[in-house]
Image (spheres, grey):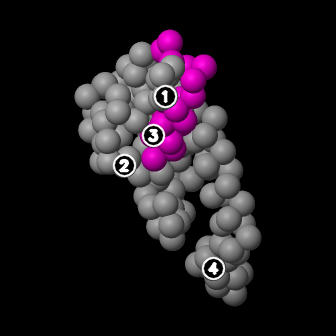
Amino acid sequence: MAWDAVREQIEIPPIIGQRDALLARVKAYIEARLADPELSVERIAHASNISVRGLHRLFAEDPKGSVSKYLWQRRLFHCAEKLRDLSQVHRSITDICFSYGFSSASHFSRLFKDRFGVPPARYRVGPED
């Protein structure tokens, strides 16, 4: 009888509020570590005390997609902000993308163009704009 109660506790999905709170904590963890090129799904799961599978399930219903997609999209968004910021015009595109966890400028450029429709150099604001 006690075993049945334990089994029921394990099989009950997390309450929606708990799931949302965990998702918010995971997203905050990601946001705080976007510059870390070693940030990975495995590291995020470990830091959040959940399995990699549990992390993927957590993001399964997220409108922004998988945890990996979320991570790359957040990095791209921050890079795009810096490219449009006049106070950052002195920084190279490579410096900006490396500062948000990218380790390859060509990979960054490909993802950026796929996301924003133009290469980073065309997206960038210059002093004459």
Residue nearest the viewer, comparing 128 with 107: 128
Question: CA–CA distance between discs 3 and 4?
Answer: 37 Å
Question: CA–CA distance between discs 1 and 3?
Answer: 22 Å
Which circle's residue, 4 or 2, is located before the other in the chain? Answer: 4
Give the label on residue 12, or none: 4
- The amino acid marked with disc number 4 is Ile
Q: Secondary structure at mark 2?
A: helix
Q: Would residue 110 be found to the left or right of residue 8 on screen? A: left
Mark count: 4
Magenta segment boundaries in residue numbering: 73-91
Answer whether labels 3 and 2 touch (C-beta < 8 Å): yes
> Which-is-in-front pick, marks 4 and 2?
2
> Which-is-in-front pick, marks 3 and 4?
3
Q: Which residue is mark 1?
A: 129
Residue nearest the viewer, comparing 73 with 129: 129
Residue nearest the viewer, comparing 40 with 115: 115
Q: Secondary structure at mark 4?
A: loop
Percent across and percent down for residue 21 are: 72, 60
Which circle's residue, 1 or 4, is located before the other in the chain? Answer: 4
Identify the residue at the far top of this view: 90
Q: Which residue is mark 2?
A: 115
Which circle's residue, 3 or 4, is located before the other in the chain? Answer: 4
- Is residue 57 covered in magenta? no
